[in-house]
Image (cartoon, grey):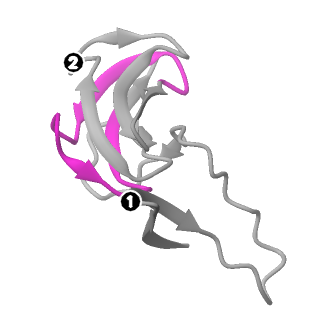
Amino acid sequence: MKNYTITVNGNVYDVTVEEKGGNTSAPAAAAAPKAAPKKAQASGAAGSVKIEAGAAGKVFKIAANVGASVKKGDTVVVLEVMKMETPVVAPCDGTVASIDVTEGSQIEAGTLLATLNEA
């Protein structure tokens, strides 16, 4: 995937483009700005479930604090993506183990936002 900044009629848009080609066995990545749960590897992540940004944008609000108990679908972080507030939700029930971004920071698609420990 490649990230581009495009200006149309004075409006600036951050877009992510997936390259299609010879590798047809790889699944297509979702363009929706939702968190994709992934198991943490031995990279020092605090929790077993990663919550990553589905799109580039700005961290608008941290909705859950470390140690908070969350249910599947509860908002953990709110991103501002293309001038729209986009909630990033917990993919499962659990406890917030880490918040890896700060409010106001610019992030790219795939940025680790938070980790959870499954309930």
Q: Which residue is mark 2?
A: 65
Q: Is residue 78 above or below residue 10?
A: above
The answer to which of marks 2 and 1 sits earlier in the sequence is: 1
Across and down, in percent, residue 107 comes to: 30, 52
Q: What amino acid type should be assigned to the residue bearing mark 1?
A: Gly
Q: Which residue is mark 1?
A: 10
Question: What element does badge 2 sit on?
Answer: loop
Q: Is residue 20 above or below residue 109?
A: below
Task: Tell me if residue 108 is in the magenta stretch.
Answer: yes
Across and down, in percent, residue 76 comes to: 36, 23
Picture quarter containing residue 42?
bottom left
- In this view, the residue in front, 29 or 51, is 29
Across and down, in percent, residue 20 comes to: 74, 79
Picture quarter containing residue 78?
top left
* Crowding near the residue tagged with mark 2, few <14, some 14–19, many ≥20 C-alpha atoms within 10 Å: some
Point out the stretch of residues depicted in magenta: 90-115
Q: In the image, what residue occupies the spot 28% across and 47% down?
A: 45
- In this view, the residue in front, 90 or 77, is 77
Question: What element does badge 1 sit on?
Answer: loop
Q: In the image, what residue occupies the spot 67% across and 59% down?
A: 29
Residue lying furthest right in this view? 24
Q: Is residue 25 above or below residue 31?
A: below
